Amino acid sequence: MSTGRWCAVVVIVCSCAVLAAGCRTKGSMPGDDLPPVDVLEGNFELESAWDNPGTLDEKAMFESVNFDFDSSQIAPGERSKIEQVADYMRRNPGTRTVLEGHCDERGSREYNLALGERRALATRAYLIGLSIDSSRTTTKSYGEEQPLDPGHTESSWRANRRVEFAVYRR
């Protein structure tokens, strides 16, 4: 094989290798294979009941429930925080609570919105299990959009993986 032909073969092989590497799929995050979350359209009773939840109850300040990385499971040490909210709601029957789910910055926007919702729903289910009527609670996910700590360290990420309680009084 002549030198010119040999160089042409090398150029073609290298070009194919570069093109093939460019087509490689990106790395995936855990849970990227989850089905998309369905959004219900329409006017549901829960929506209209929460259009004006009332006045934010400044007296009802509660600790956030924190979560492990990529988890919506409530750790045993976090349950007492939810139990305090349930006790307050039992003593104040005119209150309603929005459970706000948050995530750290790792993962796609869509994935973090879904994870924040799963965290809020897990916290809501625990409240309902403590005999709080489901009509007095709702959930909202902020994903990674409202970090408590804007840093990029493990301690910042740990602080941002949370559910917060917004308690309203009618």
Image (spheres, helix red, strand yellow):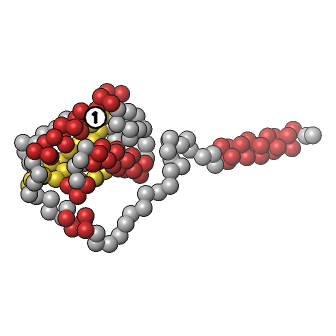
Image quarter (top left, top right, bottom left or bottom right) of the C terminus: bottom left
Q: Which class describes the residues within 10 Å of circle 1: few (<14), some (14-19), or many (20+)?
A: some
According to the picture, the residue beneath numbered tag 1 turns out to be 79
Residue plotted at (25% across, 64% down): 46
Image x and y of residue 16, in percent = 73, 46
Q: Is residue 54 left or right of residue 23?
A: left
Q: Quadrant of residue 161?
A: top left
Q: Nearer the viewer, residue 135 or 2?
A: 135
Q: How many marks?
A: 1
Q: Is residue 17 left or right of residue 64?
A: right
Going by the picture, which residue comes out furthest to the front?
Answer: 131
Q: Nearer the viewer, residue 104 or 80?
A: 80
Residue plotted at (71% across, 43% down): 17
Residue plotted at (37% across, 66% down): 40
Query: Circle 1 — which element?
Result: helix
Q: Quadrant of residue 150?
A: top left
Image x and y of residue 82, in percent = 24, 39
Q: Nearer the viewer, residue 122 or 105?
A: 122
* Amino acid on which disc 1 is placed: Arg
Q: Is residue 74 visible?
A: yes
Image quarter (top left, top right, bottom left or bottom right) of the N terminus: top right
